[in-house]
Image (tube, coloured by chain):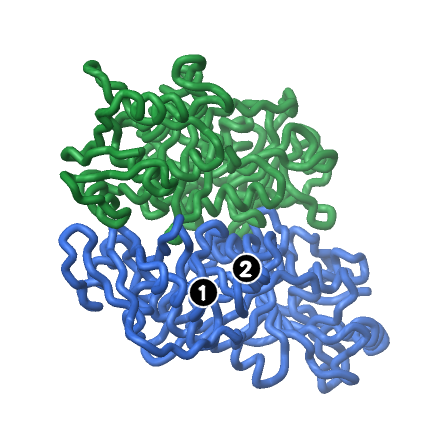
Chain colours: A blue, B green
Amino acid sequence: MPGELVKDSVIIKDQTEASQIYNKGYYGYPMSGGGLEMDLLEAVYLVECGRLEVRSGDEVISMERMVASASAAHRDFEIKYIVYRDLRGRGYLVKPAGEEFDFRVFPRGGNPNSAQTKSWVSAISERSVFAIAPFMEVMDRSERTRKELLIAIVDEEGDITFYHADRSEPKGTALREWTGPPVRAALLEDRVMVFDEVGAQRLYDHGFYGKKLGKALQLSLIEAAHLMENGRLEVYTIISGRGVKLDRFKKRALKFQQDFDLRLKAYDDLRSRGLVVKTGFKYGSHFRVYEDDPERSHARWLVHAVPADYETTWPEISRAVRLAHGVKKEILFARVTDDRTEYMRLSRVRP
Amino acid sequence: MPGELVKDSVIIKDQTEASQIYNKGYYGYPMSGGGLEMDLLEAVYLVECGRLEVRSGDEVISMERMVASASAAHRDFEIKYIVYRDLRGRGYLVKPAGEEFDFRVFPRGGNPNSAQTKSWVSAISERSVFAIAPFMEVMDRSERTRKELLIAIVDEEGDITFYHADRSEPKGTALREWTGPPVRAALLEDRVMVFDEVGAQRLYDHGFYGKKLGKALQLSLIEAAHLMENGRLEVYTIISGRGVKLDRFKKRALKFQQDFDLRLKAYDDLRSRGLVVKTGFKYGSHFRVYEDDPERSHARWLVHAVPADYETTWPEISRAVRLAHGVKKEILFARVTDDRTEYMRLSRVRP
C-alpha cells in the first residue's frame, strides 16, 4: 500500500487503497476530494505493521527516517507512539486528539461512526511533572463529558502504566455527639497523654480517638489539635502543669511537622465526613481512613494531604498508588484549598 | 515494693526487695553498699506493671508524676519508653544503653550473666531525620561486635515498626565479554533507538540491554551512557544524523534527570557485579535488579541510588521498605561515594 510523505503527513491518493486503510481500523482522515491524509503517528504504525509503504518521490522511506521526521515534527513523539501502538495492538480503535489529551479511545468493537469516545488518554513520560491543579481541571472536563480519563505513563524503558483518575467523596458513619466538659490531657514531647481513665474512655468512645498505652491514652498531635478545636480536650504541659492554648499548641506542632496545618485541615475534613482517621506512617502515607470502628474493619483508604498547587514527579505518584494497591486500599489525594478539601482518586488499571 | 525517687533515679534500699526486683528481670543496677538503683525508664515500667510503688518522702508518686519527672530528665522519654515496654512485654530482657543506641537486648531466655547482647536497638520517632552517613557508622560498629542493629520507629500514635539494617554485596552472573565494533543508535527525545536488527540482538545478548519495540531496540538514557562508556555503542541524533559524544550525551541526560550522574554511577557498579539492571519506575524505586536473564527470573532487589551525605525522613524510608516487601524484593540503598558504591539493606522485622 503506497503513501506519500508530504510535510508532516502521509497522503494516500488512490481511492480504493485509501478506503481499505480507512475502513479497516479507521486510520487517517478521508479528504474532501478523495484519498486519505494521515498523521505521522498513524503512518509509522502502519509501516511497522507492514500495511503501508511510504515514499518521497520514488524513494521508499525507512522506518528510521519515518521516526526521524515524526520526532522532528512532534515533541515527545516516541512517548505518544509507544502508547498508541500499545492500545492499537490490543485491538482498540484509537484516534489522535487535541491539546488537553493525546488520544480518544473507543469502546471495544466501537468505531467513530457507531460509538461515543469511551476514554481520554494522556501519554506522558515518567519524567514529566505532575501538577494537581491543571490535572484536576482536565479530570473534571472528562467527567462532565462522561469520558474516563486514563493517564499512560511511559517509563525510561518504554513500559506503560495506566492510571484512571476521578473524584471521590469518602463518607463514614463514625460521627458521635459530644456532651459534657473537655477531657484533660498532658503534653509530652511530640504526643499527648490522657492519664484520667474515664476521660480516656470517653474520647475513645466518641470517635475512636487515641491509642491505649497501659491504662493511659496516647493522642497524636493532630488528634489533640482536632479535639481542642472542638472543645473536647484541654491540654497542659506535663512538666509545669500550665494550660496550653490551641494557637500555641499548633505552633509547637509545626516544629515537629512542617505541614501540620495542611494535614490538620485534611484531618478535620475527613472527620467531618464521619470517617475515623489514623496515621498512615506504616503505609508511607499521611493517613489511613476507616468508615467506622478501626478494630472491626480494615482501613478502606490511604489519604495523602497536598496543597492546592501541589507539584511532584510521576514516580512519586506511582509509588503512592502502588503502596495503596499493595495493601488493597484506595489512594486519595486530599487537595486542601482555602475553602475546602477535595479528593482525587488514582488507580492503576489495565485497559 | 517501695522505691524512693532521688533526682533522676529510683532507689530501693531494702536488700531483700532489691534482690527480688533484680533477680526477676534484671531491673536496675545493684549498688555497692547493697540496694538497687534504677533508671526512671525501668521504674515507670515496674510502676505500670504494679510491681513497684515509688515514694518521695511519705507521698506515693502517681504514674503521671513519674512520667513528668522522666520527661523532664530525658529528651524523647516517651519514645524510648514505648519501645522499652514493648520489648519487655514480649519477654525480652532489655537494658538501657549509651549514646549510640538506646537498648541492649538479650537473646530469648538469656540474661546479662549468661549471654552476650544479641541486638542493639535504637528507639526513634518517625519524625526524626534519617542520615545515611552516621547511620552506616553505627551499623558497621554493630557488625564488628556481631550485634544485629534494630531500629524501632515509633509513629505518632505509638505504633512501632522494627527495621533490621546491614550491609549487602549483591552479585550476579550476567557479565558477558564484548567483541567487535560498537553498535550505532539514534538519540530521540529521552531515549535511544537501535534500528539495526543485528546490532540490537548483539546488545540484548550481551547483558540483556534494552527493550524490543517492534523490530527496533529501545535503550534508556542510562543504558546508553553505560554502553558508550564501555565502547559498545555510538550514538547519533535522529534528526541531523550527527554523532553525539559521551560528554554531551550526559549533559543532555542531566536535563531530563537531575540525578543522572548519581544513578549512572550506581548503575555502573551494579553492572560490574554481573547484575542486570532495569528501571524500577513501576515499583517507585530507581532500579530493579536481576541476578541474570530478566525473562527467566524475578528481580531480587530494588535499588535506590543516594548520595554519600543522603538525608531524608523516616516515613520516606518506611515507604521504600514497604514497597519492596510488598513485591517480595529486598530494598538496597546504594550509597554513591567518590571512590565506590556501597549497599545498605533495610528489612522490616518482628523481633
Pick the residue in front: B300 or A58: B300
Pick the residue in front: B341 or A226: A226
Disc 1 residue type? Phe
Discs 1 and 2 lie in a common subunit: yes
Mark 2, secondary structure of its residue: loop
Q: Mark 2 — on which chain does it sit? A: A
Mark 1, secondary structure of its residue: loop
**Taking B308 as reference, is A174 above or below it?**
below
Label 2, on which residue?
A295
- Residue at the spot x=69%, y=49% of the render? B213
Q: Residue B153: image x %, image y %?
A: 40, 42
- Residue at the spot x=48%, y=40% of the render? B244
Label 1, on which residue?
A208
Q: Are marks 1 and 2 in contact (CB under 8 Å)?
A: yes
Q: Residue B157: image x %, image y %?
A: 39, 53
Pick the residue in front: B292 or B188: B292
Q: Residue A44: image x %, image y %?
A: 69, 60
Q: Is residue B340 visible?
A: yes
Q: Is residue A55 left or right of residue A201?
A: right
- Crowd tier of the residue under label 2, counting other residues whose Cα lies within 10 Å: few below 14, some 14–19, many 20 or above: few
Disc 2 residue type? Glu
- Residue at the spot x=13%, y=53% of the render? A240
Pick the residue in front: B262 or B70: B70
Q: Residue B21: image x %, image y %?
A: 35, 26
Q: Mark 1 — on which chain does it sit? A: A
